[in-house]
Image: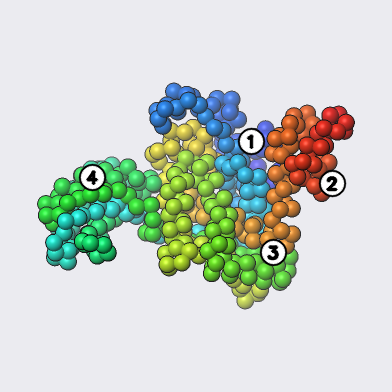
Amino acid sequence: MTGTRIPGFYNLSPEERLDLIAETANLTEDEKKVLMGLSPLSITRANRMVENVIGFIPIPLGVAANFKVNNKETFVPMATEEPSVIAAASHAAKLAYETGGFFATTTGSIMRGQIQLTNIQNPYGEMARLYENKGRILELCNEQDPTLVSLGGGAKDIEVHIIEEGESPMIVLHLLVDTRDAMGANAVNTMAEAVAPLIESITHGRVNLRIISNLADKRLVRVRGEFKRETIGGAKVVNDIIEAYKLADVDPYRATTHNKGIMNGISAVVLATGNDTRAIEAGAHAYAARSGRYRSLTHWEKNHEGDLVGTMEIPMAVGIVGGGTKSNPVANLALKVLGVKTAEELAGIIAATGLAQNFGGLKALATEGIQKGHMALHARSLALMAGADESNIDAIVERAVQDQDVRYDHILAIINSEEGRG
């Protein structure tokens, strides 16, 4: 099999889909069993990953189809409990495929470690002293992680910020660390803690906080996708999508829901690959407010041909080594399905998924409304809630869709009817 565009992919059984993915990603039979839950994460391993373990909460793992990012086709694993997310991303990717797919660039893999200094008498003088001792500071930091340095990473530079708000000034020194293919929290935090006594001796101040920042503004990913106007419903739909985006860019109430839709796609891939969803979400929302007002993470506009062009710039501190990416076997297999070789490649795919998700939401809002497609896909969950079993759930959902009423009470009525019992 070649390519990610498979007609009727959503109509296949889970086993048939997995067989196709396994063929593409060269998964073994044992790896397929892990993905199907037949060889689940052991309680022993889980107990080593987090504290006070008592069990698991399974999250469905699906794959979005039709994705092409930087001319490379890939199935995108997405872990989410919300219906319509994976379908919307796949549909958007199918439409973007016609214009070459998505294109992503990154600014590198620099993370910030913050060291807070208090009890500072002459902050500008101490700032100068810290810059004068930059070499000593970086050298001590890099002694903490020779492996990272050998891979071309490590502490590369410092920034010194003076904060004069409040009763007394503070200095915050930023370590700029190239974490390469790791998210980097452990490396950065270790460096920040190790260098703290040296910082105190240089400034005669008191070090308080020593911690990574999740506002990864030196680890940005930029993504672009184009959608032909005739394939998405014509000029009116293009204009309505742009008008919807404009509201999100000026109104924080709309921007919050708009950006939540973006994160539906991003967080699903981040979770599937064992990365830190909270760090990515916090960084994204902080970046959306960097102007002093909370705004849309995406931009939508028309090109000279009247087609729709979407772009996004977002911090993306993800890794393919260390942490949950390796300790969780399912996350490790998700990375294998993606076939990524670097953290930057993974970041580009994640951002493309977020942009696709945003397009899907805006297109639905600009045409039929968000509920029609969402509720049809949500009907299976409602049917399970109402007591349907696997033997009749498809018939019940089909009846509800035919009735154009997929509310819980209507589905419950179908189940309780003679037809539903049959």
Q: Where is residue 112 in the image (x, y as percent from the top left)?
A: 32, 54
Judge the density around disc 2: few (<14), some (14-19), many (≥20) Cα neighbours within 10 Å: few
In three-dimensional space, the C-alpha distance between marks 3 and 2, rounded to whole angstroms, equals: 24 Å
Element type at mark 4: helix
Amino acid type, residue under disc 4 in the picture: Glu
Report, in whole angstroms, how far the alpha carbon at label 4 lies from the one at label 2: 63 Å
Give yes or no for contact between labels 4 and 3 (Cβ–Cβ under 8 Å): no
How far apart are the two marked residues, 2 and 1, measured between alpha carbons?
Answer: 32 Å
Q: In which quarter of the image is the C terminus?
A: top right
Task: Report the residue marked by disc 3.
Answer: 366
Would you name the residue on which mark 2 appears?
Answer: 403
Instruction: Mark 4 or mark 2: name the one nearer the start of the chain.
Output: 4
- Label 1 sits on what residue type? Leu
Residue pointed to by mark 1: 18
* Residue at 81% over, 37% down: 413
Whichever of callouts 2 and 1 sits on the residue coming sooner in the sequence is 1
Q: In which quarter of the image is the N terminus?
A: top right
